[in-house]
Image: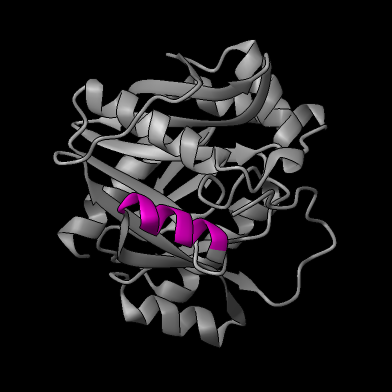
Amino acid sequence: MNNTILMYEELSFNAHPALQTQFYDGWILRFANGYTGRANSVSPLYPSTLDLREKIAECEKRYISHGLATLFKLTDGSDPKIEKMLDALGYTIVTPTYVMRMDLRDTDFQLNDCVITSYADKEWLDAFYSFSHYTGSVLKSTTKQILENVKNTTICGRIVKDGVSVACGSAVMERGYMALLNIVVDETQRGKGYGAAICESLLSAAKNLGAHTAYLQVEQGNARAVSLYTKLGYRPIYSYWYRVKKTLRKDYKNEIYTL
């Protein structure tokens, strides 16, 4: 595994923690009630010693026991043997994603009309749930618990116009690296620059707290988001994707809710 990829994968795990994590012969298995692929997938980050076919079968058992499809999160630095075995077992590629990075040392961003807090308060959560169309109690409680489980410096921001939230997002800082997360704009307010405004506000706040590098994850097929982040100054450094079985089992209780 490339050292740069390994570092950013570890940073991203800490920025978006699962509710439960298991370690299995160099592989990291994460579980979070189906909320996001990152927190509900197998990441083969470290050297492995056991038979690949047996390991994959064991992972399938563990995810089925949680009512989840088995997702494998692979990167440009993953062992090609894993990719080949998963392909042979009927796992297809979904959600190719860029990890993008930006040097903050020579940047100058503004806070805009942004309310900044050091945690996800009720107003931020209400805005995030509303903009994301989250209605189920399990989904809401899982989102809240993941945010509360972050152990590093957290920044939550809301763009407010005429007393009403129109966009929100968050950031997590570790060792000077800032993860940009949870960027969402009210559907009725899109196309007005609020997506850029919330990103710029969080970048400004993180830089003021000592961040020297910003990074994020964005689906390659989301052309609008990729364009926004590119204009802000982010550039791709590597890609990851998921492998999932072609045929989903009927006994999966939980669907992966966003990847």
- Residue 130 drawn above or below residue 52: above
Which quadrant holds residue 200?
top left
Which residue: 21% across, 40% down?
107
Q: Does the magenta portion include 159? A: no
Which residue: 71% across, 30% down?
129
Q: Is residue 158 left or right of residue 250?
A: left
Q: Which x, y percent locates residue 216?
A: 39, 48
Q: Which x, y percent locates residue 230?
A: 37, 58
Q: Is residue 83 left or right of residue 138?
A: left
Q: Which x, y percent locates residue 137?
A: 80, 26
| Secondary structure mostly seen in the magenta stretch | helix
Colour treatment of the image = one colour
- Residue 163 drawn above or below residue 102: above
Which residue: 41% across, 22% down?
155
Q: Which x, y percent locates residue 44?
A: 37, 61
- Residue 20 drawn above or below residue 242: above
Q: Is residue 25 visible?
A: no
Q: Nearer the viewer, residue 34 or 111?
A: 111
Q: Is residue 257 left or right of residue 146?
A: right
The boundaries of the magenta stretch are 224-233
Figure quadrant of the N terminus:
bottom left
Q: Is residue 99 left or right of residue 53?
A: left
Q: Is residue 190 visible?
A: yes
- Residue 124 drawn above or below residue 249: above
